[in-house]
Amino acid sequence: MSVQIGICYSRIRADEKLLLSELRERGHDVVKIDVRELELAIGEAPEILADLDLVVDRCLATSRSVYVTQFLSAYGVPVVNGSETATVCADKVRTSLALDGAGVPTPATTVAFTTDSALSAIESFGYPCVLKPVVGSWGRLMAKIDSPSAAEAILEHKSTLGHYEHKVFYVQEFVDKPGRDLRVLAVDGEPIAGMVRSSDHWITNAAAGAETTALEIDDEIADVVAAASDAVGGGLLGIDLMETDNGYTVHEVNHTVEFKALNGAVDVDVPAAVVDWLEETADSAADSKLEVTA
Ligand SMILES: Nc1ncnc2c1ncn2[C@@H]1O[C@H](COP(=O)(O)OP(=O)(O)OP(=O)(O)O)[C@@H](O)[C@H]1O
């Protein structure tokens, strides 16, 4: 059955191009929604959104993603990922709380609001430890802190020059991983594929130039991925794990996940698997609409 799917974006990346061509090849009616042109009135959905079977949120900017998904929910338009998932995943503090609250292993983390208390938290972790912005991606503005003088300098820079979000200090244990981390793409907790991202740098994400190879997803990884997905509210997610001596730890869950690098690293047709899930999700959203109106 052909469905009408909207894609919310502010920039069409290679990932969105892969999705669009897969959807169109399957004969779906795709509506491209540039969120920079949207005017979202409280109460009434703009015409472009009104009759869609499903909207896929692919907004790059976190604030847009969080608000657009909330408006879509308020208008009664089915959206993936949902606004609750977006709100949790867009913010590292909320993600850490959600993961830990659900018993999913995640690196030890402390949040502080002043440079003095942040310095005290850093001293408690010892050196090295990691300071991350609470909102952000691609490993930007993350710092591995090796010494008290580095800590003081970074905290001073953040408090003097940083945007208000940088005044929330998110301090994390440094996980001595084996030169790589793992990214698993999953739909409602079910893995589609995964990759190993290896680098000489301590930041090993693909955007920072890591080498990517296919990951074999064993039961232990699948269980952690399912639990992490449930913890943040499910959907199409990129779940990032590090290996430790005590098993896996989840350091990040991405809700507008990029999958171009993954598609190049594995034999699975990633956009096809994502579109399979979008079709199922659109069908079940249509079924629940029918039930409500019947
Ligand atoms: N606590 C840590 N200890 C050691 N390495 C870490 C730690 N946290 C993150 N890293 C490394 O830094 C990379 C980026 O971290 P993280 O995913 O938290 O940042 P991000 O900006 O959200 O990146 P992305 O958008 O790719 O998820 C990870 O892939 C990992 O290699």
Image (spheres, rainbow, N blue to C red):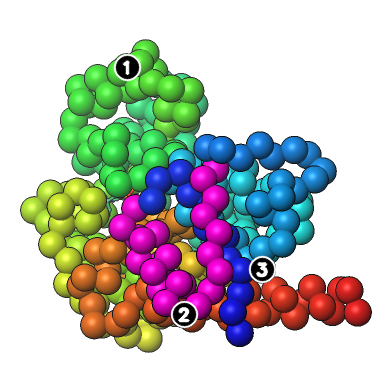
- First in sequence, mark 2 or 3: give its number: 2
Answer with the quarter of the image where residue 52 lies: bottom right
Left or right position of 205 against 18: left
Asked whether the viewer can see residue 213, the reply is: yes
Give x and y (percent) for residue 211.
13, 62
At mark 3, the secondary structure is: loop
Q: Which residue is mark 1?
A: 156
Q: Which mark is residue 26?
A: 2
Say what amino acid the circle numbered 3 marks: Asp
**Mark 1 to mark 3: distance in Å?**
49 Å
- What residue is drawn where x is 46% and y is 44%? 10
**Mark 2 to mark 3: distance in Å?**
16 Å
Looking at this rendering, what residue extends furthest in the top direction? Answer: 160
Q: Which residue is mark 3?
A: 53
Give x and y (percent) for residue 189.
50, 75
The reply to whether the residue tagged 1 has its Cβ within 8 angstroms of ligand 1 is no
Give yes or no for contact between labels 2 and 3 (Cβ–Cβ under 8 Å). no
Looking at the image, is mark 2 or mark 1 nearer the viewer? Answer: 2
- What residue is drawn where x is 29% and y is 39%? 140
Q: Which residues are magenta?
A: 13-35
Asked whether the viewer can see residue 127, the reply is: no
Q: Nearer the viewer, residue 269 or 210?
A: 269
Q: Nearer the viewer, residue 35 or 204?
A: 35
Give yes or no for contact between labels 1 and 3 (Cβ–Cβ under 8 Å). no
Left or right position of 111 against 213: right
